[in-house]
Amino acid sequence: MSIEKKHFTCVTCPVGCEVDVELRDGNIVSMKGNRCDKVKEFVLQELKEPVRVLTTTVRIEGAEYAMLPVRTDKPIPKRLFLQAIAELASIDLKAPVHITDVIIKDIAGSGANIVATRTMEHR
């Protein structure tokens, strides 16, 4: 079988290693550019199904600011991002909301919750 080459930018830590990987039949044959062992786990996950923490904002009424920053409490598959954003666009949120409050449970069927990343009191 032939060797397939892929390039990744690891997002596991702030270093952001640029990694070149050679694969044969979906198995890693060689890896260059990694500065730590976390890269291999990242690459394997990327090959299987890329996941990220979704960070965004949602509309909130009755607070000093109109938008509340939120995020998932764990990484979710990237393929679910658009579905999650659509769910978030349809919610009616009212102040007060406190940091770490769960805004939506099991967003897009991912098993992750959307949590507030800021406290917003009623104005």
Image (cartoon, rainbow, N blue to C red):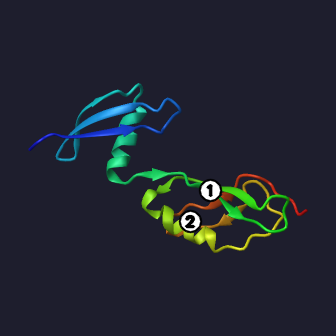
Pick out the residue farthest to the left.
1
Dot 1 surroundings within 10 Å: few (below 14), some, or many (20 or more)?
some
The kind of residue tagged 1 is Thr
Task: Tell me what residue is drawn at x 17 percent, y 47 percent.
Answer: 25
Pick out the residue farthest to the front.
66
Which residue in the protein does label 1 denote?
56
Relative placement, left or right, of 55 versus 21 is right
**Residue 107 shows up from this direction:** no
Which quadrant, please, contains the N terminus?
Answer: top left
Relative placement, left or right, of 33 versus 13 is left
Q: Hey, which quadrant is residue 114 in on the image?
A: bottom right
Determine the secondary structure under disc 1: strand
Find residue 38 and report its horizontal and vertical position in percent. Answer: 42, 34
Camera-side residue of 113 and 11:
11
Find residue 94 and report its horizontal and vertical position in percent. Answer: 79, 69
Q: Hey, which quadrant is residue 102 in on the image?
A: bottom right
Task: Tell me what residue is drawn at x 84 percent, y 62 percent.
Answer: 63
Determine the secondary structure under disc 2: helix
| Earlier-in-chain disc, 1 versus 2 | 1
Find residue 80 and report its horizontal and vertical position in percent. Answer: 47, 64
Pick out the residue farthest to the right.
123
Q: How many numbered discs? A: 2
Dot 2 surroundings within 10 Å: few (below 14), some, or many (20 or more)?
some
Camera-side residue of 14 and 66:
66
Task: Tell me what residue is drawn at x 30 percent, y 33 percent.
Answer: 20
Relative placement, left or right, of 33 versus 75 is left
Do the numbered discs 1 and 2 sit on residues whose CB atoms are within 8 Å?
Answer: yes
Which quadrant, please, contains the C terminus?
Answer: bottom right
Which residue in the protein does label 2 denote?
85
**Residue 122 shows up from this direction:** yes
